[in-house]
Image: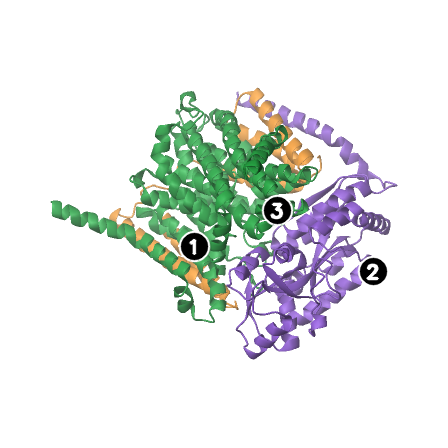
Amino acid sequence: MDSLFTTVLLNTLSLKVLMVMVIGILAGILVGTLPGFQANMGVALLLPLTFGMSADTGIIMLVSLYAAAIYGGSITAILFSTPGTTASAATAIEGFELTKQGKSGTAIRIATWCSAIGGMVGAFSLLFISPPLSLISLKFGPPEYFLIAVFGLITIASIASGSLLVKGLIAGSVGFLLSTVGLDLDSGYPRFIFGMSFLASGISFVPAVIGLFALSQVLAMVTQDSGSMGSGVAHYDKKDWKFFITLDELRQVKNTIMRSLGIGMVIGVLPGAGADVAAWVSYHEAKRFSKHPEKFGKGAIDGIAAAEVAKNTECGGALIPLLTLGIPGSTTAAILLGALVMHGLVPGRDLFTKYAEITYTIIIGFILANFLMAVIGMAVSRHIAKLTNINIGILAPVIVTLTVIGSYALGNNIYDVWTMVAFGILGYFMKNHGYHPAALVLGLILGPMAEKGFRQSLVLSNGNLLEYFFTRPISVTLIVLIVLTMVGPLLMEKRRQWKARIAG
Amino acid sequence: MKRRSWLAALGVIILSLLLVAGCGGTQSKEPQKQAPKFPTKPVNLIVAYGAGGGTDVTARLLAGQLEKELGQPVTVNNVTGGGGWNGWGQLAKANPDGYTIGYLNIPNMFAGYMDPKMKRPENLDSFIPLTNHVTDYCIWAVKGDSKYKSLKDVIDYAKANPDKLSIAAHGAGGDDHLAILQIEKLTGAKFKIVHNDSTSTSVSQLLGGHIDILGANVSEVTSQVKNGELRVLGVMSGKPSEFLPEVKTFKDQGVDVLMSVSRGIAVPAKTPPDVVQALTAALEKAMQNPDHVKKAKELSLSLDIVKGDSYAKFLKGEEQKIKQLMGW
Amino acid sequence: MRTDTLVAFLLIGLSAVFYKLSMDLTDGGDIFPKLLSIMTAGLSLVLLIMDIRKARAENGSEKESGGPKTLRPYVTFVLAVLYVAAVIIIGFFTSTVVFMVVMMLYLGVRKISNYLLAVAFVAAFYFLLFDKFLHVPLPRGLLF
């Protein structure tokens, strides 16, 4: 073991490995910040480059890109409220609020280091708890997936609370309804396509998110007269930019970090539930457990930390079923599977025994890459942040062209661009009238997962749905959790009133 | 003030257009007159599915080799959405000059135009098929420790207990689903069908014991077969697969079914014959390149080069088979 | 009409259309669309009732909450639509240059150097990254 450890460490710290890591990270941040470019496209584009490399070097480059792309989306989410990848949409809520208050440095710093912490712990868990975790993940069947989706949908209540709850629920159910558009997997019937065959695969999700968040943000931006984004407020405040997260900040968010690590890990090992789901669920939980839930939506650093930790932990988590069982949980993981196989590595037990040296080099490399990602990220985003001082008259047209090229490059078809534009004006309208776009997005992401889980359960249970759901331990646990989440706040409120009455 | 900025703007527009036109000039001149040799500019290879999918991996593998044969860059272009038909539609409508080629996916592309609900103008005649590239046969598998040892065990049980055994497939009208329909018809067995949008979900459902049988393709299961997690009951090909040599075919086990996904290259109809010929020759050479053969083997992709008329005949035959099965 | 009332009516209409269309669906494909259209319609009804009550409280005069009173976002949106249409017809690069200049003019950018810098930088960035490096086949038009 000792000699294995030293070999692995020497492998990872070689100049070649460090170099490909830096390349992967820079490419990843670029992919992440451009709207429309998702992690899987970046990994696919870089894959051919790795054929000439040794297995560990090549795969380290790809996983570095993967982690950095998932992180990079948050930089623009915070600075311009234009999330580069869909996973960063939750970060945009609190992050952009801070930017408007002139605290972009704080927001970026929290996001960056929390991403890195999530990524490192996610990678670290690969070393020790892969096999048991992957076995647990197999216990999640259709009913459990349905319940996780339901759990995620409850998040809507925390994005839109109080007087806006009805509107939030409306946005969520419309999003869910729109998610049913397209070919039905079970019957092959093209649902609600209104004669437009480009809708056969459903409403393209990424362009919809670009429209709802980025284009609508531009429309909101131009309401002001020329000048930088917030009238009179300095956006780029040099004093606010420190390189490392401070101990004080860490203390503030430490509970959130711990909780989000758990959430990211669980959702990561489940194939099919991606980084966006992890970020939203974790954001919701952070708000629910927070002592100051009223600060959410006004620039709460807990909200940023929660989303960032969870989505980057998910990256590491997603590699667990891939390495141990050969089950890729996402398209990015599927490309990584291809890369492993091409380098002669068969996922499974062999990876941790016969090929331990290569596997552990990759994992240690992944940990290191997450740290380097934070260092490079802090250095790069400082310069991107200066762009917030640019005149809106210049910034707005540039972002519009980015949303257009981003939604085009994704699927190389103009329909996706029209989708983006349509959701852009919809998002603008929604923001102005109290319907949170994030609620619609949640419906769009989680809708298919909920529907598929429910209908598969229906088939598998031969119609005995109740028996099927209530005889499975994980399913029962999830049901209890969901009920508690919904009823809990009410009970606590009642208890508080009761206590107040006694005291009074 | 106002007028000055207008003038400025006009100046910028003209200047940038000149600049941009200058850059592009070298490229726009070439295709004007009939060049003696094909190709003289980059070739665009359309894949109807997203980056990282099976067809995308196949395409990127071939693109590198094809570049060497053609002496021009070949770029993979993922045109996604529309159930694949955004991509196939774009291929059908592209300039028939040979600079746009693309993958046809059989049988997945049939539903998009044969199902009368889709009202799509394109069909097989919108393309000239050049050559098949990869054929990935369907298999049925169970968990490594399952009580079902053979195909017969499964069929017998499903005949005696209809709608008890569950099987995963990936979508109505897809290869896995068509295979199940055909087998049900031949044997009288009845299964509960669970559809997943990706086979990896089906594999984890099988390993977790949520379903009984996995319907998938050879290339999707080889790594799990190697480490003993899956047992393949049979493969729906004419002869055993090179990647699963010890597995019997369905036909040898008394169920006469042939089913696969196949990916081949086509160009838009009306592409000139000499270009078709040049492309077919280059494709064949690229596919037979030892380097390509080796890489395909590593990914468990079985190369199946069927050219020109034979490929066209194969497509028509599959079309008829699917038409009958789905009742379109 | 008040905005919320209008939205409620629109959504009830949309739900009705989806409900009607889902009656043709088979294999369980109708369950969720039906459930969701009923839910959307129900929630819209709640919104409608809330809005009518509010209207009474406010004596019919809607208190303005509908965002800033300026046409700029809408003009920007129309420009964006024209831009996408132009991308199809005259190609990506040409329309991007034209769009950026028109939009900057509209938003009142004065300095000529700003026009030159922004347009040149963006065009070069897209050209190098998407066209030369990533080989994204961007729509080409008459000029380029």
Q: Quadrant of residue B32?
A: top right
- x%, y% of residue A502? 12, 48
- Image quarter of the N terminus of chain A: top right
The type of residue carrying mark 3 is: Lys
Marks 2 & 1 on one chain: no
Q: Which chain is purple?
A: B
Q: Residues within 10 Å of mark 3 (few under 14, many from 20)?
A: few
Q: Which mark is residue A354?
A: 3
Residue assigned mark 2? B309
Q: Chain of mark 2?
A: B
The type of residue carrying mark 2 is: Asp
Tell me if label 1 and label 3 are in contact, CB under 8 Å. no
Residue assigned mark 1? A148
Mark 3: which secondary structure? loop
Is there any visible trace of residue C19 in the rendered image?
no
Q: Is residue C90 left or right of residue A368?
A: right
Front-most of residues B185 and B44 = B185
Front-most of residues A418 and A6 = A6
Q: Is residue A463 above or below residue A226?
A: below
Front-most of residues A54 and A434 = A54
Q: Which chain is green?
A: A
Chain C rendering hue? orange
- x%, y% of residue A292? 29, 39
**Seen from this angle, which residue lies furthest front?**
A2
Nearer the viewer's eye, disc 3 or disc 2?
3
Residue at 72% over, 68% down:
B320
* 3D distance between C-alphas at marks 2 and 1: 51 Å
Mark 2: which secondary structure? helix
- x%, y% of residue A65? 57, 37
Q: Residues within 10 Å of mark 1 (few under 14, many from 20)?
A: many
